[in-house]
Image: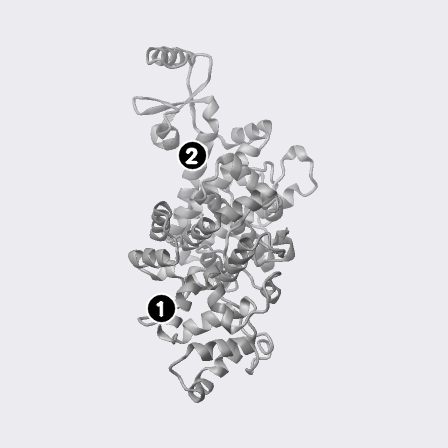
Amino acid sequence: MIRSDFSRVDPKRRAALDHKKTQFAKPQFKEQDYVHSLNFYEIPPTAEITLEEFEVWAINRLKVLSELEACSFRNRTPEETATHMTSILDKYLPLHSNSSRSSTLQEERKRDHYSHFILRLAFSATEDLRRRFSRLETMFFKLRFKDEASMERQQFVDSLGLEWEKVEEDEKRELSQELAAAGGKKGEDQGWYKVDWERVPELVEGRRVLLKRGKAYVPVREQMSLVVAEFTRRLDDALELTARALPRLDEDDRLSPILAHLSQSFTAPDAAYSSTDANIDGLSTLTAASIDTISHHFPLCMQNLHSNLRANSHLKHYGRLQYTLFLKGIGLSLEECIVFWRKSFKLMTDDKFAKEHKYNIRHAYGDVGGDANRRGRGYTPYSCQKLLTEPLPKPGQSQGCPYRTFKSDNLLSLLQRTGVNDRELLKQVKEDVGRQRYHIACNRVFEWAHKKEIKKVKDDGTWGATELDMILHPNTYFKRSWLLKHLGEGNAGIVGGLGTDSDRVDVEQ
């Protein structure tokens, strides 16, 4: 068990909120009573949780935030986002209202509370991480706020004690007259709040408030924007305090690798790989001779390795290892993989190949090696997270993710050579890469290359309840590409991630 005393992270805010905490956390280090499903996450959790809970709860929240981010980059409307996120939230982070009378309300709210603070620790180290975390948490809060029952939502807002100045009757009449003079609708019959205009930039930008003498007059109907803006402001302040306190933290050494893994996963959430994922219905047994034929289904990282291998008849060590594991992952047998590499190294003698390369291929497959845990299984194919967090390749090396390792112009040229010729898409990819959203750029390219097939499976209803989810593994990219491009040819396969059986979506023709 570990004591998750997050109060050490925000010492100033903790002192300022002592008067509020007595109703939730008395005595110290005991369970809190969660009155509302919504939360501004101002009171740090203090009860004990297990290391497994610490990690699993944080990973589940990270999956939710990642899906929200994917919805944003795919330009989904708020309604489409809410529909898509329903099944994701039910699976990873359910949160019912009081009216549901669920027996698990307190446990759900505890997981929500703790997972937020765990990720706050993991993503406070840099300004980019803080900004991204704040943006996604704000999206998440807004989604839940809109979904909450109106009475419970108002009770939560009332409990916040927000310092909004309510406009009195005399000033309301003045506002009404000014609106009428400007050709607007009469506003005397509606309520107004008066706040500093800097606190509601979203409303100012959308011209949904009246500006007067440095104040923004906000209609009551825009209450959600006020609450969301206040949530963001307080979270940004808390993240700054957390960042300052991080160097002084004396957290349990067991937590450090978990927090480091979580922050890496924010670059691209990790995806597990199972040997069963190499089996693709409708794809005949792979041979060395068929790799060239199917290489157009490869993600850009593997197409880059393949084209370099064909151009130079050679790849350096880390490129060979990355590509070997990918080929293993799509179902190429050890014997055929040895044949593939032998034929690819055209300038090398049989003796040199046997001495310098054959053992490494066998080792990657688990055919040789002293490690009992790896023997018989070998290494697993690299995920996107692995490729994005490895050291950058040195001159002459080709491994890694091209979206990360290539300069912008070279990347766009590489994409054009692989058939990506849509100017708007290339512009979006360039913007994604500039913001270090490498896996988002890759997913954009995939969806553009398979837009007809994706539309077909959606129109036919063969995707089921969950739509196309984020690709987080090169082998997932290949598998989906193959299945989508061979729809209607008698194949029955899995179009989905590399997770558990419950994560998969069956496509039957």
- Which numbered marker is on residue 393? 1
Q: Which mark is residue 462?
A: none
**Residue at left offset 53%, top offset 28%:** 158
Q: Does residue 227 appear left or right of residue 179 in this picture?
A: right
Q: Nearer the viewer, residue 252 or 406?
A: 406
Residue at disc 2, secondary structure: helix
What amino acid type should be assigned to the residue bearing mark 2?
Answer: Ala
From the viewer's side, name the closer residue of 408 and 88. Answer: 408
Q: Which residue is drawn at 51% across and 56% down?
A: 481
| Furthest residue in direction bottom, as rendered | 351
Q: Nearer the viewer, mark 2 or mark 1?
A: 1
Q: Residue at x 56, y 82 (%)?
A: 368
> Which amino acid, by three-letter code, is at mark 1?
Pro
Residue 426 at what x, y percent from top left? 35, 50
248 relative to 157, above or below: below
Regarding residue 484, the answer to whether it shows in the image is yes
| Cα separation between marks 2 and 1 | 42 Å
Circle 2/circle 1 CB separation < 8 Å: no
Taking the image as shown, residue 321 lies to the left or right of residue 333, namely left
Could you say where residue 164 lies in the image, as x and y percent from the top left? 43, 26
Circle 2 residue: 229
